[in-house]
Image: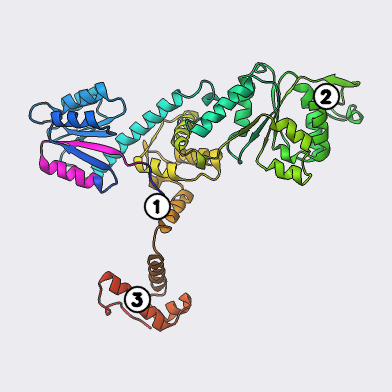
């Protein structure tokens, strides 16, 4: 299985040694780090010396009650959740515990599944609260453009956006597909003095004649037959022209754009002569422009003019600390769009999401969240709710941690099951002789401590 995030730390508080042992054994088996205390005073001493993600406390204990511990945690620990456990259920007790800040209320006796689900719900609420706090503390304005992050690579991007917004020079935004290059271009424009003028995006990956007409307007010969439609260089005066994937710009149009940048004027089909130029250029690319320049596929002068102010966007695999933050951002936004309450991710679900490399970057993560919101009706999203491709990736990650012998044994077992236990047919499918198959089965049984006979031989 893919690597999981840092283990959550839990403190279980109960005056019963049996209950403490039960809680510690069950929760440790599910990957949590668990410490125990026999009463409120001991619990407070432990909490003061070490932070915990979750406190699980009994209600009725000698001396101070669990409600006192809930009150202490809520007054002193803003980043810790609480679960109240009791063998004396009452409406009044539940209401008091919830009012004081206990996230969940669990009645004895409880099953291992009930305990695990309650803990996961509480930790999921904690994680979402943490990500919500992080989102609200981002540099002002960028979350509104869909740019979310707290990692050091994204802090560099935010600083670069701030610098670029105060300048008039061209900007080159580089990064893989789906890293948010147009979002950055929009953030630069709308936080700059040009914000009141148009932001004009143009994709360069279209046929040449369409691209030329889009940027420079129709040629003079087409005025009589073409409705009045100035090119974007004219339409966007005072604003920003965003050339998406500029590496696809044909060579002759590269030359024309270069002349515009060098001369601060341009010719279009609706002007007699040149027009004054007042337009900010931002370009983006997923490709290695230096390599294209070396191969004479891209004008070196144009590259130099654009690359003086370059912003490089990191892929999601280099922003692991941002993944849950972005997933939470999409969760809230898409839930609001479809008009449903915002669900939460279970603890293990968040671990899987954080560990996935997201090769499709932001669009892949957004689509993943969108599918979950449309298909999962429960308030909590679990790993079994994930779409098949994510579960397949998870299973593949698990397989990569298994030995070759384990994988071989499983394959032999599956082939035997498919042919009804017929070893002759199985050996033929596996590409080995029947004697070799017998030896492999014998070795497998020996490793498992089984007798050689009793395999149900056929054929």
Query: 8 or 379: nearer the eye?
Result: 8
Give residue 131's position: percent from left, percent from top. 41, 30
Horizontal relation, residue 457 to residue 134: left or right: left
- 264 part of magenta stretch: no
**SS under mark 2:** helix
Query: 27 or 108: nearer the eye?
Result: 27
Q: Residue at image x 38%, y 83%?
A: 459
Nearer to us: label 2 or label 1: 2
Q: Residues within 10 Å of mark 3 (few under 14, many from 20)?
A: some
Q: Earlier in the sequence, mark 2 or mark 3?
A: 2
Residue 315 is drawn in which quadrant? Answer: top right
Q: Residue at image x 13%, y 27%?
A: 65
Mark 1 to mark 3: distance in Å? 27 Å
Magenta-colored span:
6-27
Mark 2 to mark 3: distance in Å? 79 Å
Q: Is residue 198 above or below residue 225?
A: above
Q: Is residue 144 visible?
A: yes
Residue indicated by mark 1: 1
Q: Residue at image x 21%, y 23%?
A: 72
Residue indicated by mark 2: 263
- 14 part of magenta stretch: yes
Residue indicated by mark 3: 441
**SS under mark 1:** loop
Q: Is residue 114 above or below residue 416?
A: above
């Amino acid at each position: 299985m893919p690597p999981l995030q840092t283990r959550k730390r839990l403190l279980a508080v109960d005056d019963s040694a049996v209950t403490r042992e039960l809680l510690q054994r069950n929760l440790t088996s599910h990957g949590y780090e668990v410490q125990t205390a026999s009463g409120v005073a001991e619990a407070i001493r432990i909490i003061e010396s070490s932070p915990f993600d979750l406190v699980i406390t009994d209600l009725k204990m000698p001396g101070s009650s669990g409600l006192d511990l809930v009150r202490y945690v809520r007054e002193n620990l803003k980043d810790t959740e609480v679960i109240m456990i009791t063998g004396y259920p009452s409406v009044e007790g539940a209401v008091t515990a919830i009012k004081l800040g206990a996230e969940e209320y669990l009645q004895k006796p409880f099953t291992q599944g009930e305990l695990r689900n309650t803990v996961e719900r509480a930790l999921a609420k904690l994680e979402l609260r943490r990500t919500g706090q992080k989102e609200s503390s981002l540099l002002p304005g960028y979350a509104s453009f869909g740019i979310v992050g707290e990692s050091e690579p994204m802090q560099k991007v935010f600083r670069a956006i701030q610098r670029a917004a105060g300048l008039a020079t061209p900007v080159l935004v580089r990064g893989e597909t789906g890293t948010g290059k147009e979002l950055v271009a929009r953030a630069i424009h709308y936080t700059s003095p040009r914000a009141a003028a148009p932001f004009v995006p143009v994709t360069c990956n279209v046929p040449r004649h369409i691209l030329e007409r889009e940027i420079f307007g129709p040629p003079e010969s087409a005025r009589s037959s073409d409705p009045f439609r100035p090119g974007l260089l004219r339409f966007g005066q005072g604003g920003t022209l965003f050339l998406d994937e500029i590496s696809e710009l044909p060579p002759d149009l590269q030359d024309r754009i270069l002349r515009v940048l060098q001369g601060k004027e341009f010719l279009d089909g609706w002007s007699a002569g040149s027009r004054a130029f007042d337009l900010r250029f931002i370009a983006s690319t997923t490709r290695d422009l230096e390599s294209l320049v070396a191969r004479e596929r891209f004008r070196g002068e144009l590259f130099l003019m654009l690359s003086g102010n370059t912003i490089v966007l990191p892929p999601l695999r280099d922003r692991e600390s941002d993944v849950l933050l972005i997933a939470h951002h999409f969760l809230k936004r898409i839930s609001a769009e479809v008009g449903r309450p915002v669900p939460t991710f279970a603890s293990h679900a968040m671990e899987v999401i954080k560990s996935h490399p997201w090769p499709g970057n932001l669009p892949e993560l957004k689509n993943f969240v969108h599918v979950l919101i449309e298909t999962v009706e429960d308030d909590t999203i679990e790993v079994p709710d994930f779409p098949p491709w994510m579960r397949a990736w998870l299973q593949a990650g698990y397989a990569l941690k298994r030995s070759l012998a384990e994988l071989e044994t499983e394959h032999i077992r599956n082939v035997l099951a498919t042919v009804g236990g017929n070893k002759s047919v199985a050996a033929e499918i596996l590409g080995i002789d029947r004697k070799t198959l017998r030896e492999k089965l014998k070795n497998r049984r020996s490793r498992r401590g089984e007798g050689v006979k009793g395999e149900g031989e056929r054929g």
